[in-house]
Image (cartoon, helix red, strand yellow):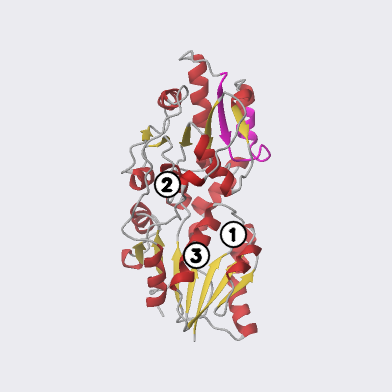
Amino acid sequence: MKNVFIICVSKDPRGAKIVFVNFLNRLLHSKRDDIHYFLFCSWEDIHSYECENITVVITKRDGLKGIMFHDRNFYKKWSLQNNIIADVVVSMQNTTINYFKGVRQIVLFQQSVPLSDIQWNPFIKSERSLFFYKNIYPYFIKRYFTADTIFVAPTNWVKEKLASKLKIPIKNIVTIYSEIIYTDASKIIPKIHNDSYCHFIYPSNGSKHKNHTIIIEAVKFLRDTSGVDISDLRIHFTVDKEGCDYLVNKIKRLNLEECFYFDGNLPYHQVLSFYKSANALLFPSLIESFGLPLIEAAQFGLPVLTVDLPYAREVLSDYEGVSFLPLHDPSSWARGISMYMTNQIRFNACEIKFETGLDDFIKLIHKSL
């Protein structure tokens, strides 16, 4: 019996968990009887995947301390305590781990910040974590890299940046596109707002690289320069006000409080309900490894306003309902928003297909044994 360690220890209840759960759902149909799969994660509900040859191990990995010490000590120690040595280690959390020599590691890379040219200021609270991911995190990504380590990039542009920015040999990188389980949009109940407002949604965390400020500046442009009546405009950020002072203060300073809702971290089914009823998806993130909401919105035929950057172009090149807008031009974003304020438009729903997917990821793992 071969042993495979699959590691996804994250506090992220949305992006990281969705990718992990989609992978596990596919693994259930592709697992081999001669392999025991050990799932190391932070989410208790993953226990539901346990069966004869799948074991779930709940562990925590918090912040810089977790990255520094958990990845260095935990997996070797656990293996020795339980007398179970992995034949392959699959890290779905961007970084290599400290493990026994001769055991191949496959690293699914989904953290885009280290690949960006944007510089962040460690003395500004809202940019401190971005500074870490840009300047320090690359050390942990490659900390235990060996000649047979394989990095899996979710898009071609990430593959190119891993080679050029992090100097990972191109022969050690493969592109396997992220994959989502497509939802039957007809079965999703729309979010009921009980008002006549036009609602836009930006599903993301509150990190500064998500570029929420361009949306705020666009609304200001609509009101002050274009003379558009914004009294019926409502934009939903899926973050809490706490921890996003830079956004809250900017909105207050511009007297735009009535236009913005901070809905907190929404469960996945509620985000899908928003897609069903919203006027458009707003997605101005400065950098993404994949941009999952772009794919999700396309399957609902929802209009998408996003940035004209490689990550967005690569995943939505075949969707008719997308507008690619300049990165730092509030007037373009204002025009895009105003275009969908008066009418709720839907395009042909689009299930984005890629040449590779989860089946190829699982084949890579099995081939590495």
The residue labelled by disc 1 is: 10
Mark 1 is surrounded, within 10 Å at the Cα level, by few (under 14), some (14 to 19) or many (20 or more) other residues, namely: many
Which is more N-terminal, label 1 or label 3?
Answer: 1
The dot on residue 25 is 3
Q: Is mark 3 on a helix, strand or loop?
A: helix
What residue do we see at 34% from left, 47% from top?
314
Q: Quadrant of residue 250?
A: top right
Instruction: Kindly report which numbered mark, 3 or 1, lies closer to the viewer in this rendering.
Output: 3
Considering the image in quadrants, where does the C terminus appear? bottom left
Q: Nearer the viewer, residue 45 or 309?
A: 45
How far is mark 3 from mark 1, CA to CA?
18 Å
Q: Can residue 21 be seen in this view?
A: yes
The dot on residue 295 is 2
Q: Residue 176, how many percent across, how many down?
A: 37, 61
Q: Nearer the viewer, residue 128 or 220?
A: 220
Which is more N-terminal, label 3 or label 2?
Answer: 3
Which is more N-terminal, label 2 or label 1?
Answer: 1
Q: Residue 223, how many percent across, how many down?
A: 52, 16
Identity of the residue furthest to the top in this view: 227
